[in-house]
Image: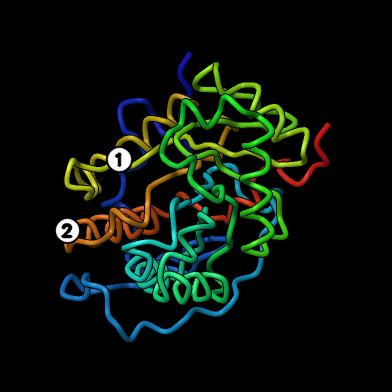
Amino acid sequence: MKKNFAEKSKQMTFLGMLALVSATSILFNGCNQKKEQKTSERMISHEDPVAKTIPVIDDENVPSDKRVIYLTFDDGPNQGTQNLLKILRKRNVCATAFVVGKHAYGSKKQKDDLEQLRKDPLIELANHSFTHAHNKYTDFYKNADAVVHDFDMAKDSLKLHDQIARTPGRNIWRLNNITVTDIKSSAQAANSMKKAGYKVVGWDLEWKPTKAMNLKGNHEAMLKKVDSIFFNDLEKTSRHLVFLTHDQYLTDVDSINELDLFIEKLQKSNKFVFRKISQYPKINEILN
């Protein structure tokens, strides 16, 4: 049985109601304050200020007609990291960067980008391994001890104090209340990560790339997917959606603008709050 979202009928989904939202309405948001932007200002300015720290809002304070979105970006620091930062600062919205250890040492620019990510109050860092599985995922997950060691290397070298992690090339979840393995041959490695204390988080929705490594499709299509996931209760945790894309897809003008428009429309719908992944329900529980 399908559910209604925010008391709306099935014939009219909440994103379809954007036109009814007042331009002056204030977004109730744990990590974000809406900023009005002129169409001519959609391109990211190089003079955007770093936003101030936004206070955390507890789950009980999120009204029942709101939904929580966790913006997450993998594989940084990478090409596009600076563009990501500019979008987040422009929209004053928080996100989680799942960073790769060896990327931080790939060049001086990548090292500098990592420090900018670390210092920005809108961003939190999480573990995406040290080697990114050498991009040989099947072989990587065959050795569970080596997988744990790889994540330990990233944690130590990048000074990541939280044990929140995401597995490269796999949509795996290992929390107390969520166990998901997309490819069964990775299960032993995932279980070993949990046993080592890692809180492994996957995603509910991914914005995938084209062959040219730009964002595929447009923001309107992604908004419809967000709508569909919430409407059909397809999230791993009801009312909470983990969104994924990658820093390196944000290198062309169209991709930058599409992500910016995606976040802007979510904000203007007045239906969402944005959170860092460390605020995901029950993620801070001690693992059994």
Give me the disc on residue 208.
Answer: 1
Instruction: Give the residue at x 80% y 36%.
Output: 287
Q: How far from the left and from the top, in percent, is residue 11?
A: 30, 27
Q: CA distance from mark 2 to mark 1?
A: 14 Å
Quarter of the image where one finds residue 240: top right
Query: Which is more toward the observer, 177 or 142?
Result: 142
Instruction: Give the residue at x 58% y 62%.
Output: 124
Element at label 1: loop
Element at label 2: helix
Q: Is residue 114 left or right of residue 288?
A: left
Q: How far from the left and from the top, in percent, is residue 60?
A: 71, 49
Q: How far from the left and from the top, in percent, is residue 255?
A: 22, 56
Q: How far from the left and from the top, in percent, is residue 135?
A: 41, 39
The quarter in which the C terminus is drawn is: top right
Quarter of the image where one finds residue 41: bottom left
Question: What amino acid is at disc 1?
Answer: Lys
Rendered view: 179 above or below 31:
above
Give me the disc on residue 16.
Answer: none
Comes first in the chain, label 2 or label 1? 1
Q: Which residue is mark 2?
A: 254
Query: Which is more toward the observer, 226 or 110?
Result: 110
